[in-house]
Image (tube, rainbow, N blue to C red):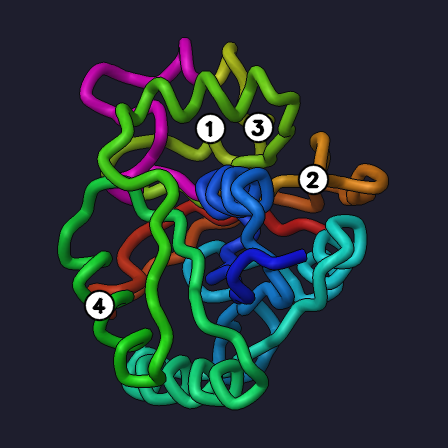
Amino acid sequence: MTGPRAFCSWSGGKDSMLALHRSLDAGVRVEALLTMFDESGARSRSHGVPPALMRAQAQSLGIPLVEGRAGWSDYEAVFTQQLRTFAAEGLTHGVFGDIDLQPHRDWEEKVCAGAGLEALLPLWQQPRRALVDELLALGYRSRVVCVDARYLDASFCGREFDAAFIADLPPGVDACGENGEFHTFVFDGPRFARPVPHRLLRVHELRSSTPATGHHFMAELA
């Protein structure tokens, strides 16, 4: 194994999964999945997945999960400190699943540079729909765990991310969800030793005055 040593910024969703898949195919040695949780550690940031499922996912993928906890105010500081720890352990790169949102790439390159690492974005500037088709063709299966109520109603939350889900999306909603319309949790596919057991408990509405949170429908998984 002579490829670069890296961590993967890990939401547990489909874009992270495809970025990981492509990186491993390219010979990158991904030695850690870094997931940021809320201050309590009870739910992952943005996607709202409980840590037990994130750990089961990482275990099936055979890559250690590194868990960070932060509020939005100290997110960057906590994230950057963990990157410095990775660098001290000999890692040289970070893998990210962003596709074409330049502010996201700018931030990722900034925090990596601050820790002496280099950002890798395997999906960058690829056609969004082509990435979706690739993911499904590879056999990855995902659950939709969060939808932005500005774009989708509660009926889309908790569904499997598949061809039927994509066909039902209203006009103007990106099939990749790159604009934040929805988020996913990957539970099976070619890189998994076994499917991640989970069940949908309920879908609940989450309202907040915080711009970073907004108005969403969240799938509670166990």
**Residue 158 relative to residue 51: left or right:** left
Q: Nearer the viewer's eye, disc 2 or disc 3?
A: 2
Residue ranking furthest to the front: 2
Q: Amino acid at mark 1?
A: Phe
In this rendering, the answer to whether 66 lies above or below 61 is: below
Q: Earlier in the sequence, mark 2 or mark 3?
A: 3
Determine which quarter of the picture holds residue 21: top right
> Where residue 107 is drawn, which disc sits there?
4
Q: Which residue is mark 3?
A: 159
Magenta span of residues: 166-183
Q: Nearer the viewer's eye, disc 2 or disc 1?
A: 2
User: For numbered disc 2, what is the local secondary structure?
Assistant: strand
Which residue is drawn at the image coordinates 50% and 35% (left, top)?
157
In this rendering, the answer to whether 12 lies above or below 163 is: below
Decide whether residue 167 is among the magenta residues: yes
Cα distance in 3D space between marks 1 and 4: 30 Å
Q: Are marks 2 and 3 in contact (CB under 8 Å)?
A: no
**Residue 102 relative to residue 127: left or right:** left
In depth, the one of 6 and 143 nearer the eye is 6
